[in-house]
Amino acid sequence: MKLLALDSSGLVASAAIVDNHITIAEYTVNYKKTHSQTLLPMLDEIRRMTELDLHTIDAIAIAAGPGSFTGLRIGAATAKGLGLALEIPIIPVPTVDSLAYNLYGSDKLICPLMDARRNQVYTGLYTFQKGIGESSGYEMQVLQKQCAVDIAEVVQQINALGTEVIFLGDGVDAYRSRIAELVTVNYSFAPACCNRQRASCVGALGSVLYRNGVQEAAWEHAPEYLRLSQAERERAGQKEETE
């Protein structure tokens, strides 16, 4: 099975081709450019460099949210357009889950942190459990589904579990001092090679979800924001004031 994988949920823009258990190509940029400037050129470069026939792609795995509202919309529009044109399904991959997948096989508790602004993080808690049999891989266990909370709330859960934890994601930089202040268990931070969104992880987890029957028609796909946008919050506030 050959997947096109996309992640534009945060500052990172990433695209990859994952063919069964092999990443054929991956293009990732973490720089001060908008995803509207980077995502399609990255896709075109991957297609050109790998001589890819887009009609050989079986499905599109997309980081479906939460994350940057604008970034998610750009990724969703790109995936939907390609899915409709190629008549292939979309695999919606939870953003925080795919970020945790960077640390596949770790024996530590994994806590992705994405800076959600307004003193909140998009986060979740994960572990990996070895399957039965020597040839079996690891299965990701979701201890806390992705959510938008105050950093103190997720740290409270971590302390209650009493297990060593690895933090990763752009929220680490924003809340490093708060983590040091609040965490009572042993902790560490993932290194630069695996501490941000990667489309190859979206594709790898997307392959697992696809085998488990998770897919949707391209026209059905919509990002999962987890909370209202600023504009929606302001409209709701204005409505309350007028009532």
Image (cartoon, rainbow, N blue to C red):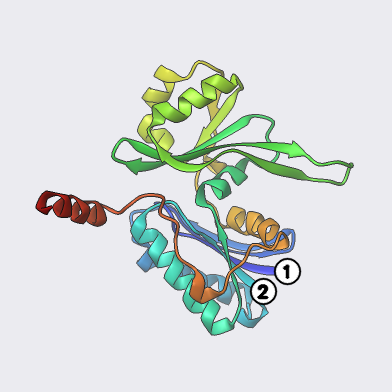
Residue at 47% from the left image edge and 23% from the top image edge: 156
| Horizontal and vertical percent position of residue 40 | 44, 72
- Measured Cα–Cα span from mark 2 to mark 1: 6 Å
Residue annotated with mark 2: 58
Mark 1 residue crowding within 10 angstroms, few (<14) / some (14–19) / many (20+): few
| Horizontal and vertical percent position of residue 126 | 60, 37
Residue annotated with mark 1: 1
Q: Can residue 44 be spotted in the picture?
A: no
Please state which of residues 65 and 51 is positioned toward the viewer in this rendering.
65
Please, is residue 102 above or below residue 83 in the view?
above
Mark 2 residue crowding within 10 angstroms, few (<14) / some (14–19) / many (20+): some
Q: Secondary structure at mark 2?
A: loop
Sooner in the amino-acid sequence: mark 2 or mark 1: 1
Residue at 23% from the left image edge and 56% from the top image edge: 231
| Horizontal and vertical percent position of residue 189 | 52, 30
Please state which of residues 119 and 82 is positioned toward the viewer in this rendering.
119
Residue at 59% from the left image edge and 82% from the top image edge: 87
Furthest-left residue in view?
Answer: 242
Please, is residue 184 above or below residue 20 in the view?
above
Query: Disc 1 marks which amino acid?
Result: Met
The quarter holding residue 202 reads: bottom right
Furthest-right residue in view?
Answer: 133
Q: Which mark is residue 108?
A: none
The quarter holding residue 104 reads: top right
Are the residues at dot 2 and dot 1 in contact (C-beta closer than 8 Å)?
A: yes
Tell me if 176 is positioned left or right of 60 in this view.
left
